[in-house]
Image (cartoon, helix red, strand yellow):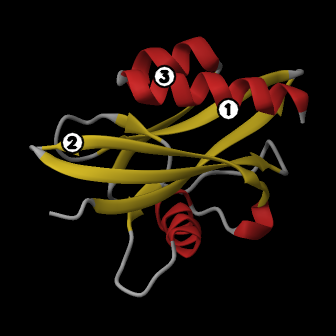
Amino acid sequence: MSPKRAAGIVIFRNVNQAVQFLLLQTSYGEHHWTPPKGHVDPGESDWITALRETKEEAGLTENDLEVYKDIKKILNYNVNGKPKVVVYWLAKLKNPEKEVQLSDEHQDLKWLPLKQAQDIAGYEDMKKLLEEFNEKAQKL
């Protein structure tokens, strides 16, 4: 069975020289917290999926972001016993005051520093991804 593919963008902003990550809380299932992401549609590239899902779920377009396409990470895990692959890129919100517009797929959003983002993200692979992206974001 080939894994389901998904793609998304880990978005950060700098506020008072501190890196904050955008996490969205799903309005379904376990109400988990995640960066904007979604399933790759047939014929769609991972990158196009990441952009589309970020616009649909957070109202942010490529013009709102400074994307670091060379900074990406692939997570492999199982959902309900089925393999899933998710590709994430790192991007900075150009205007830290830009308002995020949630879709009906999410019920809440938070901008959080690394430790708090890791705490609500829950999953070990996402905690590690956030830590790696935080180190890179601080150098940008």
Q: Mark 2 points at which residue?
A: 78
Residue 101: x %, y % from top left = 55, 57
* One can see residue 127 in this view: yes
Q: Mark 1 points at which residue?
A: 133
Element carrying mark 2: strand
Determine the residue located farthest toward the bottom in the rendered image. Answer: 43
Question: In the picture, residue 108 is in which quadrant?
Answer: top left
Specify whether 90 is left or right of 25. Answer: right
Going from the N terminus, do you reach mark 3 or mark 2 first?
2
| Tally of numbered discs | 3
- Give me the residue at 16% from left, 42% from top: 29
**Callout 3–callout 2 Cβ contact below 8 Å:** no
Badge 2 density bin: few <14, some 14–19, many ≥20, Cα 10 Å: few
Q: Work out which quarter of the rendered image holds the C terminus and state it.
A: top right
Question: In the picture, residue 26 is in which quadrant?
Answer: top left
Going from the N terminus, do you reach mark 1 or mark 3 first?
3
Callout 2, which amino acid? Asn
Residue 16: x %, y % from top left = 88, 21
- Give me the residue at 67% from left, 51% from top: 99
Q: In this view, does 51 lie above or below 122?
A: below
Callout 3, which amino acid? Lys
- Mark 1 and mark 2: span between their CA atoms? 22 Å
Q: Mark 3 points at which residue?
A: 127
